[in-house]
């Protein structure tokens, strides 16, 4: 519920001539705002999720709605089409068969390399720079690696084989002392089972990036993009561009993806959208790999499509931006007084006016009612984009807390 990738990704990535499927209706006032920004709207199919269906994924909901499947097929009407998913698993594979539309991904590769353990083994084989760590399958093995590091004053992370969202996602823990190791990790091991990635944790000031790329159906590595990444509690919290890296450093990362990691993925059958997080300072190491779209991809695609005064031409891929998540409600399943987009628009006026030199865009409308916000500042420079984003953040905090 919290991520609402159906509403976040659908509107950011595509417009007229495409279909998006959502579990809940998008606020009409928000759709009017989206059109004012210059975006046209895709054909939208709402599945009207019932309360007893909250445990079902979007694909599972769609499989249970024959009428929605028929509507998609009528809209496609024999034209060339492809399915794009955020997360790829068994229901997505079933949906491909049910719709008769190919998926823009290598399903078997995606399901295999969602595993952090399998990617770590692949990365080691390629010689990618990695944090000092180990693959462990029991608490005793984790302790054997973690204790010596803790005794040297180095914290560690313990990651379950599957899972996203950092520590807050429930599949990962950070450990700073022997007492924390003994209190946190046995429960994590018992709950998740399987194998674990245990790594030394870089603390203090770090610079992190997120790399996004596409592998075409023909196996070509294309559209490699890099954004600076913000993290909180080892989880994604935002992004920005331009990065704080030099052009030579960025070129080296792009080359590594284009000539090493990407072609290896192709050999294993990988196709579609990919992303990987990398700490580049104080020392480079490659971290979480996702054989799927990442959250920043939606912002990059939205900015690529955006027409505004900050964008010099259509050939300029994106504009300077600063993107942050703001969560004013710690429990989205108990939203309290729900907020409408019109209320938020009044609070932020005139910062949402895209004719300004610097302005703010709100994406992911499905989060707004629970006081969670995806804010993107846009401006002539990264600093200007960050400043307008921070002004919007303060206004929301003052008005809603």
Image (cartoon, helix red, strand yellow):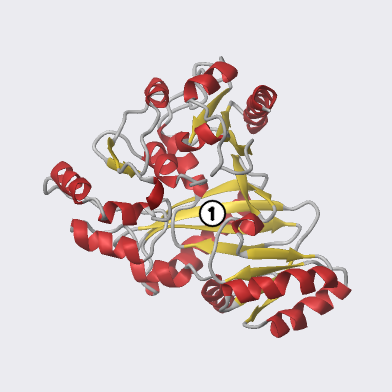
Foreground residue among 245 and 120: 120
Q: Secondary structure at mark 1?
A: strand
Indicate the position of residue 109 as horizontal and vertical percent values: 39, 70
Indicate the position of residue 233 as horizontal and vertical percent values: 70, 53
Tell me the residue that label 1 is attached to.
211
User: Does any portion of residue 316 appear in the rendered image?
Assistant: no
Which residue is rendered at x = 22% and y = 46% of the image?
68
Q: Quadrant of residue 166?
A: bottom right
Position of 23 with respect to 232 (left or right) is left
Q: Quadrant of the C terminus?
A: top right
Indicate the position of residue 241 as horizontal and vertical percent values: 59, 40
239 w.r.t. 16: above or below: below
Which residue is rendered at x = 44% and y = 36% of the image?
302
Foreground residue among 74 and 299: 74
User: Does any portion of residue 187 appear in the rendered image?
Assistant: yes
| Total numbered labels placed on residues in the image | 1
264 w.r.t. 234: above or below: below
Residue furthest to the left in view is: 78
Position of 345 with respect to 56 (left or right) is right
Which residue is rendered at x = 41% and y = 40% of the image?
7
Residue furthest to the front in view is: 52
Indicate the position of residue 18 as horizontal and vertical percent values: 26, 40
Q: Quadrant of residue 336?
A: top right
Foreground residue among 305 and 362: 362
304 w.r.t. 232: above or below: above
Mark 1 neighbour density, 10 Å: few (under 14) some (14–19) many (20 or more): many
């Amino acid at each position: 519920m919290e991520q609402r990738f159906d509403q976040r990704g659908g509107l950011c990535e595509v417009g007229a001539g495409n279909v998006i499927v959502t579990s809940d209706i998008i606020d009409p006032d928000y759709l009017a705002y989206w059109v004012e920004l210059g975006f046209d709207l895709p054909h939208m199919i709402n599945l009207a999720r019932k309360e007893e269906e909250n445990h079902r994924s979007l694909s599972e909901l769609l499989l249970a709605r024959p009428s929605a499947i028929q509507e998609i097929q009528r809209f496609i009407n024999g034209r060339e089409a492809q399915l794009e998913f955020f997360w790829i698993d068994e229901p997505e594979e079933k949906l491909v068969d049910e719709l008769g539309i190919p998926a823009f991904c290598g399903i078997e590769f995606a399901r295999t390399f969602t595993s952090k353990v399998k990617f770590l083994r692949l990365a080691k084989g390629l010689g990618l720079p990695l944090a000092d760590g180990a693959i462990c399958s029991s608490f005793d093995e984790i302790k054997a690696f973690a204790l010596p590091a803790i005794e040297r004053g180095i914290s560690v992370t313990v990651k379950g084989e599957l899972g996203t969202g950092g520590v807050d996602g429930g599949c990962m823990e950070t450990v700073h002392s022997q007492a924390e190791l003994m209190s946190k990790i046995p429960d994590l091991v018992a709950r998740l089972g399987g194998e674990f990635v245990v790594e030394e944790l870089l603390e203090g000031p770090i610079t992190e990036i997120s790399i996004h790329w596409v592998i075409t159906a023909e196996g070509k590595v294309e559209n490699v993009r890099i954004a600076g990444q913000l993290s909180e509690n080892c989880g994604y919290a935002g992004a920005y561009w331009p990065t704080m890296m030099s052009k030579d450093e960025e070129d080296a990362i792009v080359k590594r993806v284009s000539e090493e990691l990407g072609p290896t993925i192709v050999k294993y059958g990988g196709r579609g959208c990919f992303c990987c997080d990398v700490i580049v300072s104080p020392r480079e190491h490659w971290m979480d790999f996702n054989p799927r779209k990442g959250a920043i991809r939606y912002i990059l695609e939205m900015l690529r499509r955006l027409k505004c005064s900050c964008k010099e031409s259509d050939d300029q891929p994106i504009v300077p931006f600063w993107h942050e998540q703001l969560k004013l409600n710690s429990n989205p399943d108990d939203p309290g007084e729900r907020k409408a987009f019109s209320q938020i628009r009044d609070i932020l006026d005139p910062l949402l006016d895209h004719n300004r030199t610097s302005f703010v865009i709100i994406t992911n409308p499905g989060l707004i009612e629970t006081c969670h916000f995806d804010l993107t500042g846009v401006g002539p420079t990264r600093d200007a984009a960050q400043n307008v984003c921070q002004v919007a953040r303060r206004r929301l905090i003052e008005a809603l807390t």
